[in-house]
Image (cartoon, coloured by chain):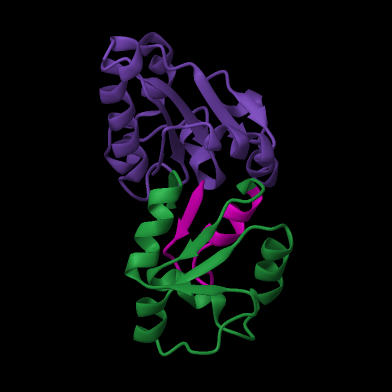
Amino acid sequence: MSEEQDIKKIMHVMRRAPHGSIYTYEGLEMILIMAAYEQDLSVAFIGDGIYALKKDQDTAGIGIKGFSKTFMALDGYDVEKLYVDRQSLEERGLTEDDLVVDVEVMDASEIGRLMNEQDVVIHH
Amino acid sequence: MLHTINKSPFENNTFTTCVRFLQPGDPVLFIEDGVYAVQAGNRFGALIQSVLKKNNPVYALKPDLDARGISAIAEGVKTVDYAGFVDLVEEHQVSSWL
């Protein structure tokens, strides 16, 4: 099997707010590990998952390090396909300008179509 | 793509969110506390019918229904046993909406 065939299309779906549980942080770690194996990665932000990308998060007061800056570094690991669900964004009174990274804002049907193209979809 | 839902729709919006992302023909399978969604007469009946109308098959795992005492289920919803669950997973890629 050639190396080319070992590359899988993997979508990570971030669905939870960043500091209330460990899901988002663990998901981000998984993305970075998979990026090291040069897989075809994409990340979809749905529902409260969008809050992980909110600008101006200052976690000093809750005694944790915070990881919104790590999302800004994904670009450096060639993870550039970041999709945000338009309805989730609008429901929360946010716009693209409120997010720490450049994303593609898409309708749910379009993200759903991309999900169906994946070899693996992992929800966090 | 097979979408599995394992949370009660009354405490979690997973089911309603999942529906927005469904593609034509994608089956939905309720497992664990997710099966509360298919109990006949609850407030998710209309949403389930709308999913079925769009030709997305809806399944619920029988052992999980039995464990919760749910025998009357929404019209059009099919039940599967563990072997049926495996068949679905074999036929489709899986999106597990945890």
Question: Taking the image as drawn, is residue B98 in sight?
Answer: no
Locate residue A13 relative to residue A6 in the image: left or right.
right
Locate residue A1 relative to residue B33 in the image: left or right.
left
On whether residue B98 falls in the magenta region, the answer is no
Along the viewing direction, whichever of B77 and A35 lies nearer the viewer:
B77
* Chain identifier, colour purple: A
Percent position (x, y) of residue A56?
49, 28
Residue A16 to residue A98: above or below: below
Percent position (x, y) of residue A69?
39, 22
Percent position (x, y) of residue A90?
70, 41
On whether residue B18 falls in the magenta region, the answer is yes
Residue A7 to residue A116: above or below: above
Chain B on-screen colour? green
Residue drawn at 64 percent across, 45 percent down: B23
| Residue extent of the magenta highlight | B1-20
Percent position (x, y) of residue B50?
72, 64
Q: Split into 4 quadrants, where in the image is the C terminus of chain B?
A: bottom left
Along the viewing direction, whichever of B91 and B47 lies nearer the viewer:
B91
Along the viewing direction, whichever of A77 and B38 lies nearer the viewer:
B38
Indicate the quadrant where residue A65 lies.
Answer: top left
Along the viewing direction, whichever of B50 and A18 lies nearer the viewer:
B50
Residue A96 to residue B30: above or below: above
Question: Taking the image as drawn, is residue B43 in sight?
Answer: yes
Number of numbered discs present? 0
Residue drawn at 67 percent across, 31 percent down: A106
Locate residue A19 relative to residue A56 in the image: left or right.
left
Indicate the quadrant where residue A102 lies.
Answer: top right
